[in-house]
Image (tube, rainbow, N blue to C red):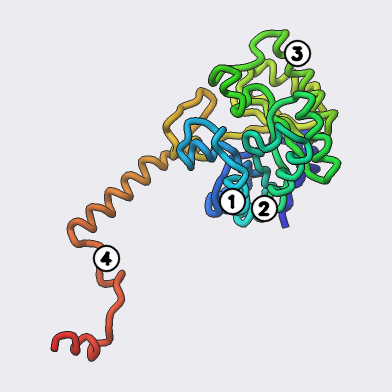
Amino acid sequence: MKNVTVQTLQNMKNNGEKISSLTAYDYSTAKYLDEAGIDFILVGDSVGMVILGYDNTCNVTMEDMKVFTGAVARGTERAMVIADMPFMSYHADIAEAVKNAGELIRAGAGAVKLEGATDHILAVIKRCVESGIPVMAHLGFTPQSLNTIGGFKVQGKTYDATMRLMEQAKKVQEAGAFAVTLEMIPAESAKYITEHLDIPTIGIGAGKDCSGQILVSDDVFGKYCDLSPKFVRRYGDMSLLIKNAAAGYINDVKHGNFPNADESFNLKEEEAGKLCC
C-alpha cells in the first residue's frame, strides 16, 4: 500500500515540511526512488524527450503514458504516483478528458497532472475531482504549449504577469486541484503564489520557496544531457558510468575475456567427451 496521499502532501505544506519529487518512467528507477524516500513520483510526459527521443513532449500518446505509468506503479510501495495527461488528451472534450484521466488511474497512478487554467481546463479539473480523480495543476511554463509560448521561456517576469499567475493558481485551487506545479517563473513570484495558496506548490525552476521541488530524474542523474536547464542540479554522471561500463564490456568481448569459465555453463565431462568423436 502506498503511504503518501493527497492529504499527506497537504499536511506537509501545512507543517512547513518540504515535498520532494522526481520523475520516473520505468520499474527499476521507480523502485530505487521509492526506497530512497521520495514523496511522490511523476510519470512525466518528459518521457517523450528523455526516453523516446522526441524534440518535445507533444508526441507522447495516452498509450505511451499508460505503459510507463504501469511500470512505475509496479515499482513503488510508499511514494505517490502522479501521471501527466499527454498533449490533446484533455483539451477537446470534458467527458473524454475524464475518461483518459481514469485510464491513467487504472494503469496505477494515484493522481493526474494537467497544464493550464482556461475555463475548459478548470471544468476538466472540477469534473475529474468530482469523479474521484485527484488533479495536480501546472502553471507558468507549460511544455505542451511550447509552440504558442514561443519556446522555452521564463513566465511571470513582471508584477502584472505574476498577478495573472496568482489568479490562475487560485482558480485551479477553487476547481479542486490538490497542488500546482510552477515551472520556470521568478523565485519571488513563486514565493508570493505559495504564500497566498492553501494547496502545495511544486517548483521546477521556480526558486526555493515553493512547498516542494521536482526535477527530471534523468537530468539529476546525468543520464540525459541533450539539454542543460539553468535550474537543474546534477547529482551523478550516469552518462559517463554507462559509457565506461559499455567500453569495458566491448573490450572484454573483443579480446575474448568475456565470458570466462565462471560465467559459462558446461557439459558433464563424459558428455563433453562424446563431442570429440
- Amino acid type shown at disc 3: Met
- What is the secondary structure assignment of the residue under circle 3? helix
- Give neighbour class at mark 3: few <14, some 14-19, many 20+ (Cα, 10 Å): some
- Amino acid type shown at disc 2: Ala
- What is the secondary structure assignment of the residue under circle 2? helix
Q: Identify which residue, 124 or 109, lies in the foreground.
A: 124
- Marks 2/3 in contact by CB < 8 Å: the verdict is no
Q: Earlier in the sequence, mark 2 or mark 3?
A: 2
Residue 114 on image: x %, y %: 69, 34
Residue at the spot of label 1: 67
- Marks 1 and 3, how far apart in space? 38 Å
Residue 225 on image: x %, y %: 42, 33
Q: Is residue 260 left or right of residue 137?
A: left
1 or 4: mark nearer the eye:
1
- Marks 2/1 in contact by CB < 8 Å: the verdict is yes
Q: Quadrant of residue 116?
A: top right
- Marks 1/4 in contact by CB < 8 Å: the verdict is no
Q: Earlier in the sequence, mark 1 or mark 3?
A: 1
